Every structure is written in C-alpha cells, then in structure tokens.
C-alpha cells in the first residue's frame, strides 16, 4: 500500500496477501482438514521471525511443530493454510532493536504477514487467563477468539487506535521528539484515542496536551498497522492559527516548527540526516505523512 501522490515506499505492515478466510475460522471441521502436510507454520523465535537472505519469511510444516503448540490460523495463501505458533510469553516492553532490523530486512508483503501474525500470537501469549474470572482460556475460531473455561466469557484480539498527526502553520510543520528518540530525531505527534472520543477530538486533544497548540480542520490521510503490540496508527493532518508552543515535558523532550526547506533537506540527506534533523525512517507512517505534505 502506497500513499497516493508520493514517491515513498509502501507503508510498512500493510498489504498482506493472505486471505483471512473467516468462513474457515468458524468451521472446525474445515480447519482441521487444512492442518495437513501442505500447511505452513511461520518460523518464529519468540516473537521474532526467521527469514532468508532475500528477506522472505521461513516456514515449517505442521509435522515440525510440537503437538502441544497453540497454532493461530492466519489464513490461506497459494492454496495452503498458513499458521503461526503462540510463544511461551508475550512482549513485555517496546520493540527491541532486533525488531527494527527486521522491519528493514523483510520484503514488504512478508513484513505485512509477519506484522499481523505478531500482533495475534502476542495477544494469545498474554491472554491465557480470563480477565473476568481468572480461569484458563482456550483458543477458538482458529485463534481469532479465546473462550473462558470457567465463566464462558469470550475474548477477542484487540487493536488500539492511535492518532498520529501533522500540524501545519504558514507552510511549516510541528514535529516533536520523545525522550527515547536519538538526538536530532523528530517525528509527528501521536497519542492513543481515549474512550468517548472521535478521531478528530483525539487529534486536537493530544496536540494541545503535548504542545499547547489549538488546531482545526483535522483530516484523515492514511493508516498503518503497528504490531508493537497491536495498534492502528491513524494518520491525520491539521491546521494551527497560533504557533506559540507550551511543551508538556513529561511527554516530549522538545517540539518545534520546521520549514519546508529544512524538511526537504533532511529527506534528501537520508539516514544520515542534517545537523538539525533526522527524517523519520521509511517504515514509520510519520515518514509517509511528511512526504505527502512535501509532495502535495
């Protein structure tokens, strides 16, 4: 998936070629028939994928997987059923450095397949017990549900919506840097959508909370699945009339307005950046949003 009107690479984790085959998920007999010698199981080391020198995912057969392994049905591809194994433990923190390497080495379609699988198996690893009564849960519907053995509650994989947004004022963009960012790295502001909010309200609230700026004319641009652990980044743009900043230092180390020329220079400099700024990496939707703004 590309952002229209830009020369940017495909949006990372989007564009999976897998047919999720919901009609098979709900049919235990049909699913059982597909768990045969032709089925493929993703090679995972915990939550990290194994892949070849060309950046293609490596797959086991069903026979290579221990019998007690929980398998999640990813869907159909090339007339074969594809599965992923649930690891012993889920993620306990932000993405590891190795995961950043994976994002740059996997082919786009394989990265999309892996991203969906990672979100799903991570959720299973962290939801082996019922949030309602504490009893053990078991996979159902090919791994797209877990059922409680105690109270009968049904649990479903979750996706957390996150707004990530450009703020424009007189041909400048507002970007911020979080404490965990390396020096000179700035990106679009972002934050979780809270209960009872529209996307537009979340954009306006987050920008005001983090940078003290009021915005209008919020518009949706594009989205990106982000499997760390399972978010949907909702890319938007907005307009500010007053550029004065009041930075929330518990959220940001810094925020500032960048001119079009400064952003163009940083993009041209690539991974080395300029003395002022690193342009966001291509696997981040912030890269695509800023490129879209520059190329309009």
Image: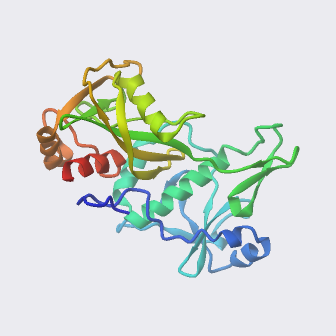
Left or right: residue 249 versus residue 21 is left
Where does the image place residue 65, in percent across and percent down from the top left? Answer: 65, 66
Whether 58 is drawn above or below 266: the answer is below
Left or right: residue 196 versus residue 191 is right
Whether 157 is drawn above or below 181: the answer is below
Residue 73 makes an appearance in the image:
yes
Left or right: residue 37 versus residue 52 is right
Q: Residue at x 39, y 56 (%)?
A: 12
* Residue situated in front as seen by the camera: 95 or 8: 8
Identify the image quadrant of residue 44: bottom right
Residue 191 makes an appearance in the image:
no
* Residue situated in front as seen by the camera: 132 or 55: 132
Where does the image place residue 191, in percent across and percent down from the top left? Answer: 45, 34
Identify the image quadrant of residue 92: top right
Q: How is the image coloured?
A: rainbow
Quadrant of the frame with the N terminus: bottom left
How many labels, in total?
Answer: 0
Q: Residue at x 20, y 53 (%)?
A: 295
Where does the image place residue 183, in percent across and percent down from the top left? Answer: 25, 30
Q: Please identify the residue farthest to the right as the structure is shown.
A: 150
Q: Residue at x 66, y 43 (%)?
A: 126
Identify the image quadrant of residue 20: bottom right
* Residue situated in front as seen by the camera: 57 or 145: 145
Where does the image place residue 96, in percent across and percent down from the top left? Answer: 44, 42
Q: Residue at x 63, y 71 (%)?
A: 21
């Amino acid at each position: 998936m590309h952002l229209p009107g830009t020369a940017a690479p495909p949006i990372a984790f989007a564009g999976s070629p897998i047919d999720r085959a919901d009609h098979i998920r709900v049919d235990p007999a049909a699913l059982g028939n597909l768990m045969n010698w032709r089925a493929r199981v993703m090679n995972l080391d915990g939550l990290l994928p194994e892949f070849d020198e060309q950046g293609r995912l490596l797959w086991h057969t069903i026979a290579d997987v221990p019998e007690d392994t929980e398998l999640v049905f990813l869907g159909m591809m090339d007339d074969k059923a594809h599965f992923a194994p649930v690891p012993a433990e889920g993620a306990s923190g932000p993405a590891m450095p190795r995961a950043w390497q994976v994002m740059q080495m996997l082919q786009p379609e394989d990265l999309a397949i892996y991203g969906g699988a990672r979100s799903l198996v991570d959720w299973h690893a962290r939801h082996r017990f019922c949030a309602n009564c504490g009893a053990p849960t078991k996979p159902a519907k090919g791994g797209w549900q877990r059922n409680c053995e105690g109270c009968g509650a049904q649990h479903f994989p979750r996706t957390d919506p996150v707004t990530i947004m450009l703020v424009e004022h007189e041909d400048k963009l507002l970007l911020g840097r979080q404490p965990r960012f390396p020096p000179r790295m700035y990106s679009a502001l972002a934050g979780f959508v809270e209960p009872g909010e529209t996307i537009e309200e979340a954009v306006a609230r987050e920008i005001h909370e983090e940078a003290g700026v009021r915005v209008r004319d919020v518009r949706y641009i594009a989205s990106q699945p982000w499997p760390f652990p399972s978010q949907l980044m909702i890319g938007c743009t907005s307009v500010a009339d007053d550029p004065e900043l009041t930075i929330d230092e518990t959220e940001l180390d810094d925020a500032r307005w960048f001119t079009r020329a400064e952003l163009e220079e940083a993009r041209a400099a690539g991974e080395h950046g300029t003395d002022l700024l690193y342009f966001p990496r291509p696997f981040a939707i912030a890269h695509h949003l800023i490129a879209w703004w520059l190329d309009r």
